[in-house]
Amino acid sequence: MKIFQSKSELKKYISHLKSDKKTIGFVPTMGALHQGHLSLVKKAKDKNDVAVVSIFVNPTQFDNKEDLEKYPKTLENDIKLLESVNCDVLYAPTADDVYDGNVKSESFDFDGLEHQMEGKFRDGHFDGVGTIVKALFEIVTPDVGYFGKKDFQQLQIIKKMVEKHNLPVKIKGMPIFREEDGLAMSSRNTRLTKEHREAAPFIYKTLKKARKKFGTKNAKEVVAWVEKKFKKHPLLELEYFTIANEATLQPIENAEPNKKYRAFIAVYAGDIRLIDNIRFKNN
Ligand code: PAF
């Protein structure tokens, strides 16, 4: 695997690949890689000539200084994992390299997608995500970008950015990877205490029960049911639970035929914030 820290070196290498007509599959990450990330890299490798991964903990998308400082950094292990799935290229820049010395967010209009859920609770988060992903796309010039559906709102926002800015890249959303007990894989899981780690599968269990209830109850009733469940939980604190239209991310009250819905959740397990989501069937 070729490792680049400098974008000018990486760009030179990419231009050679392009002149050889190689297609590029790209997986942007913040490192602390797990099987979910590796599934994206395998897909990128499978469907393209070259798989490129970036590892960069992007400061502009964090609204919480402590969360940024404590974000797990495991570069040596990440490199081993990437080599184990035959990743071709890793870009692991400093903030100054990727931001050209100006570590600041651009301001984006994602047609309202950015004001729901994560956008309500993490100030400036999606401007930070948009800024870094657009910058990385400009450097890597991928044919396809791969993103996990665990960050479903992020996925929709990136698709919107690509559409609005006419970026020449296809975006693929990939399934959520879960631990055996159902907890969605996340780099933050490694920071959970033993107690919170044991409690955390309650999140997905509750999502699955809520999905069942959605067959007979309206969205408001299901939301109230989930809120009540978490109020009673001694270790997990619900930040939000929303049932929304998949395309617009607008919360709904009643399901309509031929629309796709998804439930979104954010929960604090101690000081670790976990998110998850699940597709709801519309009966
Ligand atoms: O999903 C992530 O890990 C990050 O938000 C991303 C897309 C790498 C941008 O920093």
Image (cartoon, grey):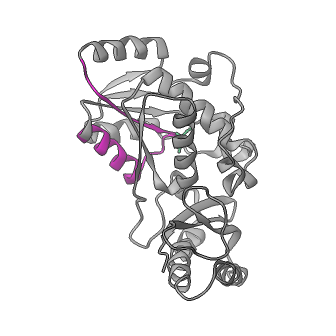
Q: Nearer the viewer, residue 179 or 46?
A: 46
Q: Please say whether residue 35 is one of the residues in the magenta stretch.
A: yes
Q: Residue 204: x percent and y percent?
A: 51, 73
Q: Residue 45: x percent and y percent?
A: 27, 38
Q: Is 225 placed left or right of 277 in the picture?
A: right
Q: Residue 113: x percent and y percent?
A: 65, 50
Q: Please say whether residue 92 is one of the residues in the magenta stretch.
A: no
User: Residue most toward the front?
Assistant: 257
Above or below for 185 versus 67: below
Above or below for 70 versus 242: above
Magenta-tinted stretch: 21-46
Q: Nearer the viewer, residue 18 or 165?
A: 165
Q: Is 26 placed left or right of 29 in the picture?
A: left
Above or below for 230 versus 140: below
Q: Nearer the viewer, residue 127 or 102?
A: 127
Q: Residue 46: x percent and y percent?
A: 24, 41
Residue beneath the point at 51% across and 29% down:
166
Residue beneath the point at 69% across and 55% down:
116
Which quadrant does the N terminus fall into?
top left
Q: State ligand 1's quadrant.
A: top right
Question: Total of numbered circles in the picture?
Answer: 0
Residue beneath the point at 48% across and 40% down:
31
